[in-house]
Amino acid sequence: MSTAQARDGAAVELSGLRVAFGKTQVVDGVDLKVERGQALALIGESGSGKSVTLRSILRLFPAGRSRIEGKILAAGKDVLALDTKALSHFRGGDVSMIFQEPLLAFDPVYSVGRQITESIQRHEKISSKDVRARALALFERVRIPSPERRLDNYPHEMSGGMRQRAMIALALACRPQVLLADEPTTALDATVQIQVLLLLRELQRDLGLSIVIVTHDLGAAVEVADRIAVMYAGKIVEVGTAKEIVRDPHHPYTIGLLRSRAEGAMDKGSRLQTIPGSPPDLANRPPGCPFAPRCFLAEDRCRKEMPPEVELSPGHRAACWFTDEASSAYRAGPQPVAVEMA
Amino acid sequence: MSVIPNGLDPFATDRGGPAQPLLSISGLIKHFPVRKGTGPKRVVRAVDGVDFDVLKGETLGIVGESGCGKSTTAKLIMGLIERDSGDMLYDGQAIGERAMPWRSYRRQAQMVFQDSYASLNPRMTVEQSIAFGPKVNGVPGRQAVERARALLARVGLEPKRFAGRYPHEISGGQRQRVNIARALALEPRLVLLDEAVSALDKSVEAQVLNLLLDLKAEFGLTYIFISHDLNVVRFISDRVMVMYLGRVAEIGPSDQVLAAPSHPYTQALLASMPSLDPDNRTQEALLAGDPPNPIDPPSGCRFHPRCTLAEGVCSAVEPSLSPVMPLHRVACLARQPGSGHSAAPSEAIAA
């Protein structure tokens, strides 16, 4: 239904998004824009607020225990202004979501086909014969082998990869414009992960779907995303095209993430470059840049003032006082690390 | 100098010399019965005839998809589950026999699990958890606590701040450091790491990998490192073993196996690692579908239904693990002279 709607404006636009649970400010001022038909990856460590940012787009948090501030526009709708009824049409109809563990996301006591047809019937007036045909087409679309038989399977009867495909079919059931994916491949084997990532890319291309994927794996992000946003302690520290982030990072945290990957280590037995310390406690957020205590470039100014976002080139932004220094440190290549052991 | 009393334990020190493998596994089999309905009795062939050696001082990486038997192999090595058949020799001595009872073997071999939280007792402080093993083995209480504190300091956790904390009070990376300290408390020679860094964030994973390298050099440890992340395995391992449906597909030096894989399955595994190059993204998945079920493994070569090189002979003949290079062995008919496969090399490689 929603496919016929006006196709102007961004698919998702967050401005000044802040999400707090009690006194803990988990998302602290996120501005983000995803164009229609684009795939964006949000990457970061656990606790960086990437999943909370994603879930706030569907308002999946109970109103009493969370506080959302700022503006969320998704599929042309002001999400924070929707009433209960409009919200339930919006979820699934305009924007839908797939989760990390499909076994927990499906209802174990109904067959997968039944859950898909139920979802379609909830949103549209459709005959039971047509709805079955549409569920079947969805299963074919996500390439589930012998789809007719698989529709009658219960979630536990499917393997992990097939369940994630079924999850994607369910998410696409009401023809949403935006697909949100929360760590969709983390629980899967590498051989299955690449199949699911390729499927997401194919759906983006063929259906013109806009995708926001949350992952902690830079490799998975590069495989699907056109653009990558790096989150740290509830803020976006760098955003740019996949190429800009991987080849030309300007934020010390992005550089740390790239360097700490095991494939970056040239020689066996050489040590990996690490980011020292651990992420900050969000309940006691230090003043200034949240990454300063772990940063190799930090100076006094970083500990006092939060750096503004700097536009490095159109669409490539980083929030750091020392983007030039960070970039030239990265270009200089990994400095040889002293071998500490005998 | 051991802190463990009855230091006369002959296995605490090297017996067979450097050439004797620390651990020698042959014909290891473990089948789990499936209780389902009343049909014919069926079994999961989790580990189905596995042979390998772990050399002294090396790191052997084990990789494979879920259900390939890598964790079951680790549990069998630790004796956490009982093997159906097969021989396990530790430094030349059969494990579980009178000369090498499980109890003294387990002091030498320790394990670190994936779930750092579930593997610690929630009612014990980290110091108590680390000191527990030595205490059970007869170390006086105060000495055991001293040792726990020294180990905490060694894995990078300041004893003053962390000794009295409970597992839920520390982060995942810190908990895994505690688990590593606990594994080292009995001064083992062999440490099994079963997906020990998989649950950690990338930046923390790098810290723990560096720590593992340091500890290995400092204490002269031998590692068995199980992981599904080929990049991590390539980084840390000297040799790599690739498992598929309860059997060994390929084993050899890690730079050979992961740089020039010989088995089509290893090639497919490597091809499914996400590329970090935005201009050169993966175009096609080499392996379709999920790993098959180890209840009814395919006949002949277990990989043949998913293999690009499969021919008629592959479904009939089960390939043996034979050398393609010195130290590098592969179970694939296409690599074995005289196997009947059309791509097989014409004669044995002079090794």
Image (cartoon, coloured by chain):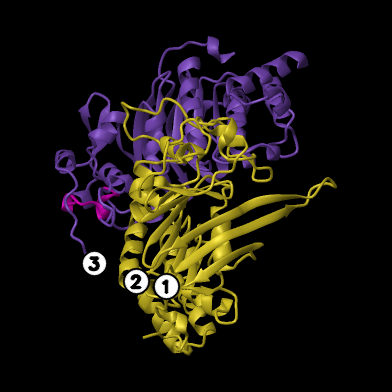
Pointers 2 and 1 in contact (CB under 8 A)? yes
Where B159 sits versus B25, above or below? below
Q: Amino acid at mark 1?
A: Arg
Q: Is residue B207 visible?
A: yes
Which chain is yellow in the picture? Answer: B
Q: Quadrant of residue A212?
A: top left
How many C-alpha atoms fall within 10 Å of the one at disc 1: few (<14), some, or many (≥20)?
A: many
Where A174 sits versus A316, above or below? above
Output the chain of dot 2: B
How many C-alpha atoms fall within 10 Å of the one at disc 3: few (<14), some, or many (≥20)?
A: few
Q: Position of residue B96 (x, y in %)?
A: 59, 75
Q: Is residue A87 visible?
A: no
Q: Which residue is mark 2?
A: B220
Q: Magenta span: helix, strand or loop, mainly?
A: loop
Q: Which residue is mark 3?
A: A341
Local secondary structure at mark 1:
loop
Q: Amino acid at mark 2?
A: Gly
Magenta stretch containing residue A298, yes or no?
A: yes
Specify which label sits upstream in the sequence, 2 or 1: 1
